[in-house]
Image (cartoon, rainbow, N blue to C red):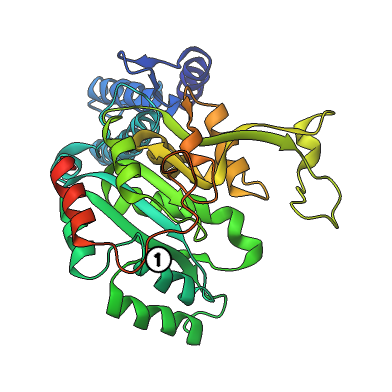
Amino acid sequence: MWLRHCTIRAFIRRALWAKAGATGIFIPLRAHYHAFMCTWLSEKITCSPQGDLGGRQAEGPRMHVIHRLSNEIFCGIGRKIAEAEMDIAKAKSEGYLWGNGTGGTGTEGSSRKKFLAVIGVYTGFGSRLKRNTFRGSWMPRGDALKTLEEKGVVIRFVIGRSPNRGDSLDRNINEENRKTNDFLILESHEEAAEELPKKVKFFFSAAIEAWDAEFYVKIDDNINLDLAGLIEMLNVRRGSHGLYMGCMKSGAVVSEEEQQWYEPEWWKFGDSRTYFRHAAGSLFILSNNLARYININSASLQSYAHDDISVGSWMMGLNATYVDDDRLCCLSAVQEDGQCAYGGYSGDISSMQLQRIYQDYDLT
């Protein structure tokens, strides 16, 4: 029996690798193998009521029961493995197939509130003054921030944890967040200079798991944002799939270790040592399915020295739609009347400005 078992197994390994339905999902070989072997073994045992397996005399009904039970165990485990592998294959496929909805799968995903955008503002432990400046300019705070979220736009400061977990740095952030409730704390990310290139993976993964939005926006904390202008820009692009938006640029790869912007993986960019086209890291936008792709595949995605290069490299392998918008090319964005808004707003964002956002745009 076992010789025949191995022969069939070898045949299956050579012959089977199927493509399921119209989704283009490759079902793992093990799923076919277990389905085939469970059927074959069941038939074999059914045809051997006296325990005559493979031409050998069995030891009566007891041997038959043992083989039947082992077959049931084998098939049960195999079936669960096969189902899990097919679920994983389906999930990975849905991470980048443009035809799928932007929400999660199943009833849980469909029942989640839909947002227009999640805006993540990168921050650090020593940037409390910058955060307070943001809260006093373009970023609503308190009840106004909560109302904006109810209307469909989430804004959060994005920060990881201290290398020394639970120290005063972590405690200070926790205390600040208790007062302001405007942080997205990346529990799995270490907030340190050498770990900064990996932060973008953790941000998109955490954001898409927490909120189901049309767009996910990453900005640096030196950006004075025209919030109404950004919302208008995104609102007209609702329903976009594969959208990669920002100030597209290229440039030389720095291969000298002592220089600023050094790229340890410089040799991968060819003899010309020039970066591919990518959105500048100060502000860029991904549609839901691109952010979901990063979340699903984060463990296998290569990170470079700079997060904008990392994201650009991931987008190159996908059928992403690049949108180069000049309004996102200033240190302060979005431009107003052709000029960058370096001066920003004076004082709190006014209730009139918030009412304009609420009334002009159906955000949810």
- Which residue in the structure is indicated by mark 1? 134
Query: Can you give x and y, in whole percent of width and height, for residue 113 in the image?
Result: 16, 47
Q: Quadrant of the C terminus?
A: top left
Three-letter residue code for mark 1: Phe
Residue at the image point whose x is 40% and y is 64% from the top: 157
The image quadrant of residue 24 is top left
Left or right for 92, reference 264? left
Query: Can you give x and y, in whole percent of width and height, for residue 171 in the image?
Result: 42, 84
Q: Most extreme residue toward the bottom, as rendered?
A: 168
Q: Is residue 1 visible?
A: no
Query: Can you give x and y, in whole percent of width and height, for residue 190 in the image?
Result: 54, 67
In terms of secondary structure, where does tag 1 sit? helix
The image quadrant of residue 108 is top left
Q: Nearer the viewer, residue 204 or 302?
A: 204
Residue at the image point whose x is 36% and y is 34% from the top: 289
Left or right for 165, reference 286? right
Residue at the image point whose x is 38% and y is 31% from the top: 89
